[in-house]
Amino acid sequence: MSDEQPQHSSDYGPPPAGCYPSPFPTLYPSTFSPDTNPNIVACFQLADQDESGFIDDKGLQRALSSINESFSMRTIHMLMYLFTSNYTRKIGPKEFTSLFNSLQSLRAIFEKFDRDRTGKIGENELNEALLSQGLVVSPTVLELLVTKFDKTLGSIMSVDYENFILCCLIVKGLTEKFKEHDNMHTGSAKFTYGEFLFNVLPFLVT
Amino acid sequence: MSDEQPQHSSDYGPPPAGCYPSPFPTLYPSTFSPDTNPNIVACFQLADQDESGFIDDKGLQRALSSINESFSMRTIHMLMYLFTSNYTRKIGPKEFTSLFNSLQSLRAIFEKFDRDRTGKIGENELNEALLSQGLVVSPTVLELLVTKFDKTLGSIMSVDYENFILCCLIVKGLTEKFKEHDNMHTGSAKFTYGEFLFNVLPFLVT
């Protein structure tokens, strides 16, 4: 998304009017490549009832339910944003394939660490799960993540599957935004005020 | 919260174990100062049924409802975090007074810009409302905010009162985090990876 990102002046105010491209990239029509897993194609086509080449939020929720990935509409909207970088709430074959593959791989990671098959994982397992995706967070951030994503109301802090998916995708997304602004790979990233808000706000699950 | 903030090494990995203070500041007991508006004290005491000096999330929801500030539990949790900087989900007299006063002032701002009394405001009004709080965002960020906080399902993008409160408090909170890292007031802020996640993740409304 960095190509789409506006250039801001160095104070906290907005730049002169007229120098802003749309903040959201266009969602172009796409097709499945011939080597796509036929399950993905079938799952998409089932939801694309009007054969428009796009499915909407309800269609995506239905399509994912049909492969045992049942998510709330809030999670569906977040997934749509994360895989399209825009808010049209439509998703095409290309983005659906990425989403499908990501969910399959996150499902495998979750099941690997949900050793006792309770449908939820604890703080240490979440850390291992993040590490297995190359995401190295500090103990402080880990504690924050478990606190934020624990919706299980249990006595021990733990994260269920849906919140695990959200947590991983949000940490991954924020990490990518950070790296885009850490050009010199020094471990420090610099943001103008506008860039900071523009990069961070999309990850708010509203 | 910056005093509480851990120091991170300059790569993406965690620092050596043992050098982390708790990420969440302690919520100390407090009392109302003698000049506190009696309505605030009465409102708090009504909800503090066990007279512990703290009210929990349900108590806060009840207390705010009694002054016509009805919010979902998600918003209540976000408000509790924003005014205590921790996740104990308890709030004392000191934090309640700040929250009460903030809501009163945001209510006045909302009503000023909700000129047609529809209970929602459009993009331009949101911009004016933010400006009136000293929050100057670019057109791109404004568009993003309206897109994120529009839950009205109307044909015109607009933000209702509850989402207006969330939007203002989140933008204000993120702006403060940005400024804490823009020590030289250059309009650019520098974050390590750990600082970036630690500062941003609390604003995720999960």
Image: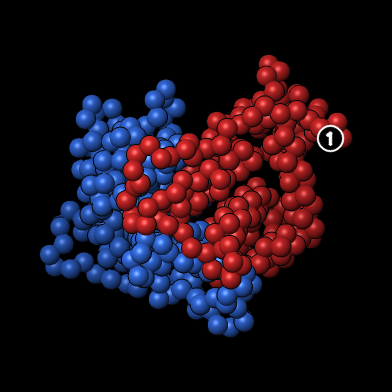
Chain colours: A red, B blue
Q: Which residue is mark 1?
A: A36
Q: Is residue A84 visible?
A: yes
Q: Position of residue B134 (x, y in %)?
A: 26, 52
Work out which residue is located at the far left of the displayed protein and give it: B35
Chain ID, mark 1: A
The quadrant where residue A146 appears: bottom right
Q: Where A119 sits versus B94, above or below?
A: above
Amino acid at circle 1: Thr
For residue A132, side relative to residue B195 (left or right): right
Q: Position of residue A89 (x, y in %)?
A: 57, 31
Residue drawn at x 75%, y 23% is A46
Q: Nearer the viewer, residue B156 or A176?
A: A176
Residue drawn at x 81%, y 27% is A42
Q: Where A32 sits versus A19, above or below?
A: above
Number of residues whose C-alpha sits closer than 10 Å to that of mark 1, classed few (under 14), some (14–19) or many (20 or more): few
Q: Position of residue B49 (x, y in %)?
A: 32, 58
- For the image shown, how many numbered marks are present on the structure? 1
For residue B182, side relative to residue B66 (left or right): right
Q: Where A28 sits versus B60, above or below?
A: above
Q: Is residue B51 visible?
A: no
Residue drawn at x 42%, y 35% is B150
Residue drawn at x 46%, y 73% is B5
Q: Nearer the viewer, residue A152 or B5?
A: B5
As helix, strand or loop, the secondary structure at mark 1 comes to loop
Q: Quadrant of the N terminus of chain B?
A: bottom left
